[in-house]
Image (cartoon, grey):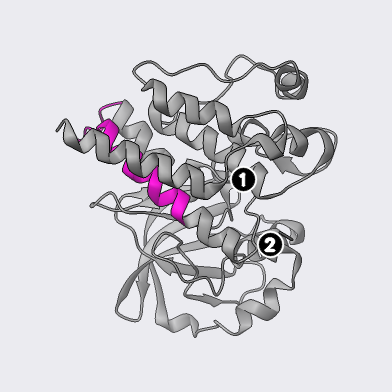
Amino acid sequence: MSMLDPRQTDPTKRLRTLSVSRDTVALSRLVQEGIYGRIYQGTYRTQQVTIKTLNDTASKRVVSSFLAEGSMLYGMEHKNVLTIICANLDDPKQPLLIYPFTNRGNLKKFLIKCRQKKNQIVLSTQNLVDIAIQILLGIMYLHGQHICYKDIATRNVVIDDKLQVKITDNSLSRDLFPNDYFCLQCQESKPVKWMALESLLYNQYTAASDVWAFGVVLWELTTMAQQPYPDVDPFELGVFLRNGMRLRQPLGCPDQLFALMNYCWAHHPAERPHVNQMLAFLQEFYTALCRFV
């Protein structure tokens, strides 16, 4: 299957079709802020929305990347994929990208709060498997659209009060989660610790490299968003993985889930499971968990 990267097409042209007047958008509460990126809760007309934008220190390259990544899922329609609904490009240095609002926000930050007991939600294994199934359904849809996401991670997923999740684009992720990205031999910051071996070594991306990243997402879910490979230097990760080393089984993680993770991290892409196989396994495992509740 030939995979596409929508970030390679002209984002401004795509976003002009979604352009709305600035006076229809209101920014209210600052949710998250990085060096140059900001996420607000706000309104578009009467609709509650999430708004991504930049401050006036952002370079032209940052603005271009922001628009490309922010429009990468434009036109996608799936219950587990969050797409941009409109944009305002009146100020070319500080464009506004507007998305449907999700009241629990970023999945990674939500999981960290659960781990730190900063909210009253206790996630069961059943909950975590259900979240994994939803993320996988989103990945399956994107692959069906011939889209290789390249950055599957909990930081690029949002969640609501009913624990319904959606994959969103990765615009601002490098700025808002700087510890998740590293520059190696190139100028671009990459999600090194989520990347498949062939992506790290040869810059190759396929559906199978997204499967590898999904294995890391399963590990994130079962650790409540701990950092993968905390003791491995990013520059040494390629050698680490090539030598057959992998993430360890998280405390309390069911053996069945860890076995699936390891299948996702097979050395050769052809040896990794297909998304349909993973879905069948996770749905069967979820059903088995329900029998014991």
Kindly identify the residue that appears in the image at 74 percent across and 73 percent down. 10
Judge whether 75 appears above or below 139 on screen: below
Q: Which residue is mark 1?
A: 210
Under mark 1, the amino acid is Asp
Along the line of sight, the residue nearer the viewer: 258 or 226: 258
Q: Residues within 10 Å of mark 2 (few under 14, many from 20)?
A: many
Label 1 or label 2, whichever comes before in sequence order: 2
SS under mark 2: helix
Label total for image: 2
Quarter holding the N terminus is bottom right
Q: Which residue is mark 2?
A: 63
Kindly identify the residue that appears in the image at 44 percent across and 83 percent down. 23
The residue stretch that appears in magenta: 116-137
Kindly identify the residue that appears in the image at 58 percent across and 63 percent down. 144
Under mark 2, the amino acid is Val
Q: Quadrant of residue 110?
A: top left
Kindly identify the residue that appears in the image at 57 percent across and 66 percent down. 73
